[in-house]
Amino acid sequence: MVDPFEVGSHGLDILGQELRALGRARLLSMIVAYKLNPGGHDLRQLTDAQLITLIVVAVEAALLDRTK
């Protein structure tokens, strides 16, 4: 599985590219595995593009928080 934090640390644009190559099931698995949906929101209605945005934004926020 792609580690979104590892890839994201090299560039969020690279992360987005990597995520676009994955299928929906893998995106959802990644969100669960890396706890990227802490609010427990229902993600079934989101498009793949929205799932990718969720992952990228969550990773960006976590990486910014680490630098504080």
Image (tube, rainbow, N blue to C red):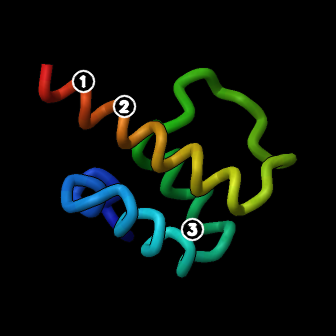
Looking at the rendered image, the disc whose residue lies closer to the viewer, 3 or 1, is 1
Disc 1 secondary structure class: helix
CB under 8 Å between discs 2 and 3 = no
Residue 61: image tag: 2
Name the residue carrying label 3.
Answer: 26
Question: Which one is earlier in the sequence, the residue at label 3 or at label 1?
Answer: 3
Tell which residue pokes out farthest to the left in this image.
67
Question: Residue 31's x, y, as percent?
Answer: 53, 48
Between 33 and 5, the residue placed more toward the observer is 5
Whole-percent x, y for residue 19 in the image: 50, 69
- The residue carrying pointer 1 sits among few (fewer than 14), some (14 to 19) or many (20 or more) residues within 10 Å by Cα, namely few
Residue flagged by tag 3: what amino acid is it? Answer: Arg
Q: CA distance from mark 3 to mark 1?
A: 25 Å
At label 3, counting other C-alpha atoms closer than 10 Å, the crowd grade (few under 14, some 14-19, many 20 or more) is some
Q: Amino acid at mark 2?
A: Ala
- Left or right placement of residue 30 versus residue 42 in this view: left
In the displayed structure, does residue 65 sit left or right of residue 34?
A: left
- Residue at position x 65%, y 52% from top? 51
Q: Secondary structure at mark 2?
A: helix
Quick one: SS at disc 3? helix
Q: Residue at x 46, y 73 (%)?
A: 17
On screen, residue 4 versus residue 57, left or right, reads left
Residue pictured at 39% horizontal, 63% vertical: 13
The reply to whether discs 1 and 2 touch (Cβ–Cβ < 8 Å) is yes
Pick the front one: 20 or 34: 20
Find disc 1 in the rendering and name its residue: 65
Q: Position of residue 34 (x, y in %)?
A: 40, 45
| Label whose residue precedes the other's in the sequence (2 or 3) | 3
Packing grade of label 2 (10 A; few <14, some 14-19, many >=20) is few
In what quadrant of the picture does the C terminus appear? top left
